[in-house]
Image (spheres, coloured by chain):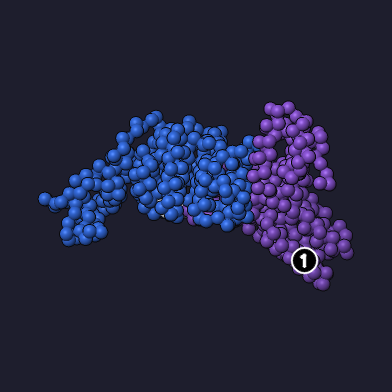
Chain colours: A blue, B purple
């Protein structure tokens, strides 16, 4: 297990954020603190991850609660502008002008980020395209690039202007394993000295690159801490059995034919070493327990 | 080589002071012309020259902008503004062709049926629709990125509005030329067009990008229907009084729009593409 780096001072602090759509509470009193480095946001479909990232990226204002990021309070227009100047945002479904080349597109985003001097802007565009290994295809139209390449173009656009706060919504979705590794490296690099918040369904993403993890479900924070702490939550609660265990919260047959169970083990059960995935599933289960309680 | 880069342009080039479109010509030319490269090497001091070569390297691997973008720059638009403009969704061929088709059909019908009101009713709606579609989530796939960018949303909106309005007015103007028989009356769409566009935009900060233009367009059609019931030679909006009314509405709309400029930054107009908020 890698040593857990000390958590630095908070760079982003959110208190009691809420946002509802009609009857749905997409965010229901979310409070969290982020510091430099990569924080993973884990949660099932509909947990509110995208909504939370959109709020933190100033794409939508919250109904209630507040937050500051790198000292900027987005409730005032100057605070919002300050935050936007130091923000890099990769939406879950980044849209593109299909006729643009990779270069044109990143250049367009650079202009939106107020880089109007042509020479400086172009060298910045080349820098970020280099950073995501896309120098070779910068003259290609986006509609001719593969999905994974387009995802990298969007990441390059998020990196323009060396933002201090990076918000990435499921950046590793739809990438093949090799690309996913490459992407993790890129994000880990970006996390040096920056505050990065990344949402994902994949516990491996978190295990491999995050120093902190937040579990969100039903618009609420279920867990906030280090990946090691999340894993430790499952200590003594994972066991193996020959038959399906009736009282387990979750159980599945493994490759060797035995069942791996999570929950309250029976006496004398064959306990297993917990993984981050186990800890995550247990943190989610708190939700159904609370709902039925 | 039929031409060479002028001495003073070479000097400006080496200092990084040459601007597009001259810059592009110089880039392209220098890449092919040994004589001008030599000239460049001779005419400048070494430090400045290095910067010049670096520039040339960089420029050669930045892809050449599209034709529409190069045209805009040639007409004096700053190159970053030109790129924002080419990213305007409705300034695409498909939209322009649709508008052209509508106008041609209308002009033909007007000529056949001698019903100028048909053209006068339609013409103001086209710029309104174009402007409504050019900013906001419905047609701009990069809207979510544009919203969180520091560039002021109102500025982007204005850049695009001016461009789309300009294109729309030119097309309407051409259609007007095809109706010479009606004299000045054929131009009576202009002020209503400005009035509808200004109020449509001003209201979209409050009512959203779909409801606002729809409401304004609906109000315009209702007004025309009411006017049509009155037995006059000319429809009320196209009389002198109606035109002054349109001018006043256009001014009020513009004022309202300016006053609500910060709203375009604070919250998005409607939902984002790809579902969600
Ligand atoms: N514009 C909207 N109108 C109504 N409900 C919405 C809207 N946007 C989001 N929601 C609801 O808010 C909740 C959270 O959605 P959100 O997109 O934030 O989830 P998510 O965690 O990002 O899910 P996924 O993993 O599928 O991306 C869901 O129940 C969703 O249906
Ligand atoms: Mg999502």
Quarter residue A221 falls in? top left
Measuring from the top left, give residue A181's x and y in whole percent: 41, 47
Farthest residue toward the bottom?
A: B112
Residue that mark 1 sits on: B104
Q: Is residue B104 left or right of residue B153?
A: right
Quarter residue B265 falls in? top right
Residue A282 to residue B35: above or below: below
The answer to whether residue B65 is seen in the rendering is: yes
| Residue at screen point 59% across, 38% down | A124
> Callout 1 environment at 10 Å: few (<14), some (14 to 19), or many (20+)?
some
Q: Front-most of A277 and A183?
A: A183
Q: Front-most of B269 and B239?
A: B269
| Residue at screen point 25% across, 55% down | A250
Q: Mark 1 lies on which chain?
A: B
Farthest residue toward the left?
A: A268
Q: What element carries label 1?
A: helix
């Amino acid at each position: 297990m890698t040593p857990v780096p000390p958590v630095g001072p908070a760079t982003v602090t959110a208190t009691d954020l809420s946002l509802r759509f009609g009857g749905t509470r997409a965010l229901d009193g979310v409070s969290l603190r982020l510091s430099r480095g990569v924080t993973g946001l884990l949660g099932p479909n509909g947990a509110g991850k995208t909504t939370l990232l959109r709020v933190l990226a100033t794409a939508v204002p919250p109904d209630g609660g507040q937050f500051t990021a790198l000292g900027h309070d987005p409730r005032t227009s100057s605070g919002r502008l300050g935050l936007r100047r130091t923000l890099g945002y990769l939406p879950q479904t980044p849209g593109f002008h299909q006729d643009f080349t990779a270069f044109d597109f990143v250049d367009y985003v650079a202009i939106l980020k107020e880089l109007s001097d042509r020479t400086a802007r172009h060298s910045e565009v080349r820098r970020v395209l280099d950073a995501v290994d896309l120098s070779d295809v910068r003259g290609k139209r986006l509609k001719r690039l593969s999905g994974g390449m387009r995802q990298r173009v969007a990441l390059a656009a998020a990196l323009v202007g060396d933002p201090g706060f990076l918000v990435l919504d499921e950046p590793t979705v739809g990438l093949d394993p090799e690309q996913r590794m490459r992407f993790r490296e890129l994000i880990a690099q970006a996390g040096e000295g920056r505050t990065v918040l990344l949402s994902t369904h994949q516990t491996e993403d978190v295990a491999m690159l995050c120093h902190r993890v937040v579990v969100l479900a039903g618009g609420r924070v279920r867990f906030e801490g280090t990946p090691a702490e999340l894993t430790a939550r499952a200590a003594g609660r994972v066991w193996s059995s020959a038959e399906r265990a009736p009282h387990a919260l979750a159980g599945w047959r493994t490759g060797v034919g035995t069942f791996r169970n999570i929950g309250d083990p029976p006496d004398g059960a064959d306990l297993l070493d917990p993984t981050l995935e186990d800890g995550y599933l247990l943190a989610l289960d708190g939700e159904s327990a609370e709902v039925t309680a | 080589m039929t031409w060479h880069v002028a001495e003073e342009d070479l000097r400006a080039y080496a200092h990084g002071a040459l601007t597009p479109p001259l810059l592009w010509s110089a880039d392209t030319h220098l890449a092919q012309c040994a004589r001008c490269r030599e000239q460049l090497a001779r005419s400048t001091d070494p430090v400045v020259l290095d910067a010049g070569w670096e520039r040339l390297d960089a420029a050669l691997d930045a892809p050449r902008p599209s034709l529409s973008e190069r045209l805009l720059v040639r007409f004096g638009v700053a190159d970053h503004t030109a790129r924002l403009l080419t990213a305007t969704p409705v300034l695409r061929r498909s939209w322009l062709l649709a508008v052209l088709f509508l106008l041609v059909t209308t002009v033909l019908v007007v000529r056949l049926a001698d019903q100028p009101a048909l053209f006068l009713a339609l013409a103001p709606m086209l710029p309104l629709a174009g402007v409504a579609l050019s900013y906001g989530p419905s047609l701009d796939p990069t809207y979510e990125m544009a919203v969180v960018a520091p560039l002021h949303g109102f500025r982007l909106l204005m850049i695009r509005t001016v461009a789309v309005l300009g294109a729309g007015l030119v097309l309407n103007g051409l259609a007007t030329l095809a109706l010479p028989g009606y004299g000045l009356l054929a131009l009576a769409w202009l002020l209503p067009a400005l009035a509808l566009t200004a109020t449509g935009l001003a209201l979209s900060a409050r009512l959203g990008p779909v409801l606002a233009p729809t409401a304004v367009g609906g109000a315009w059609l209702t007004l025309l229907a009411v006017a049509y019931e009155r037995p006059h030679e000319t429809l009320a909006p196209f009389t002198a009084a109606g035109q002054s009314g349109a001018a006043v509405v256009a001014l009020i709309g513009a004022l309202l729009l300016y006053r609500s400029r910060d709203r375009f930054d604070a919250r998005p107009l409607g939902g984002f593409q790809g579902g969600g908020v």
